[in-house]
Amino acid sequence: MIHSLYSNKEIFLRELISNASDAADKLRFESLADPKLLGDDAELGIRVELDKKQRQLTVSDNGIGMSREELIDNLGTIAKSGTAEFLEQMTGDTKHDAQLIGQFGVGFYASFIVADKVTVETRRAGLAADEAVRWESDGKGEFSVESIERA
């Protein structure tokens, strides 16, 4: 188990960037029908920032975002049941593990390979700033969700 976790550290970053790209694509598509979803920021992008002092990596995007319900449905369900099973099945074989990630549909959960805690702050495009939410989990079956304000 330890070997498989350490040999696949790069997977999480690829998956987070892929998710951010998907969020941008979804906003681009939905904004064709509702241009105001783009707001003042018509240039979609992804940022990767490293804070060595805090030992924190942030991947951010200005894509579609998620509502509170979407956040719980998309992240909460797997956090309760799938993360442990997913991590137990990691073998250390990069090809096998990449297929496993696709099978589980939980690329995001590869983050727990390298992180003690994962935090997601999001607001669905079109919702008010005070409808943003923060999801947090240590990957051990529990998670928290709280309302935040986010422009």
Image (cartoon, grey):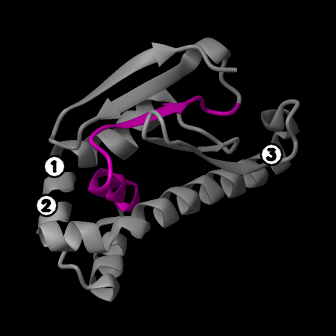
Marks 3/1: CA distance?
34 Å
Sort mark 1 into few (<14), some (14-19) or many (20+) by Cα contacts within 10 Å.
some
Mark number for residue 35? none
Q: Which residue is mark 2?
A: 85
User: In the rendered structure, does residue 110 fall within the stretch colored magenta?
Assistant: yes
Judged from the image, the secondary structure of the residue bearing numbered disc 1 is helix
Identify the residue at image location x=46%, y=35%. Answer: 120
Marks 2/3: CA distance?
37 Å
Asked if residue 91 is positioned above or below residue 83 in the image, the reply reads below
Q: Are marks 2 and 3 in contact (CB under 8 Å)?
A: no
Judged from the image, the secondary structure of the residue bearing numbered disc 3 is helix
Asked if residue 49 is positioned above or below residue 8 in the image, the reply reads above
Residue type of the residue flagged with mark 3: Ser
Residue type of the residue flagged with mark 2: Glu
Q: Which residue is mark 3?
A: 31
Give the tally of numbered discs: 3
Residue type of the residue flagged with mark 1: Ser
Mark number for residue 81? 1
Marks 2/1: CA distance?
7 Å
Identify the residue at image location x=34%, y=31%. Answer: 136
Expressed as whole percent of the image width and height from the top left, the position of residue 92 reads 22, 79
Expressed as whole percent of the image width and height from the top left, the position of residue 109 reads 33, 54
Expressed as whole percent of the image width and height from the top left, the position of residue 83 reads 21, 53
Which portion, as a residue range, is magenta? 106-125
Sort mark 3 into few (<14), some (14-19) or many (20+) by Cα contacts within 10 Å.
some
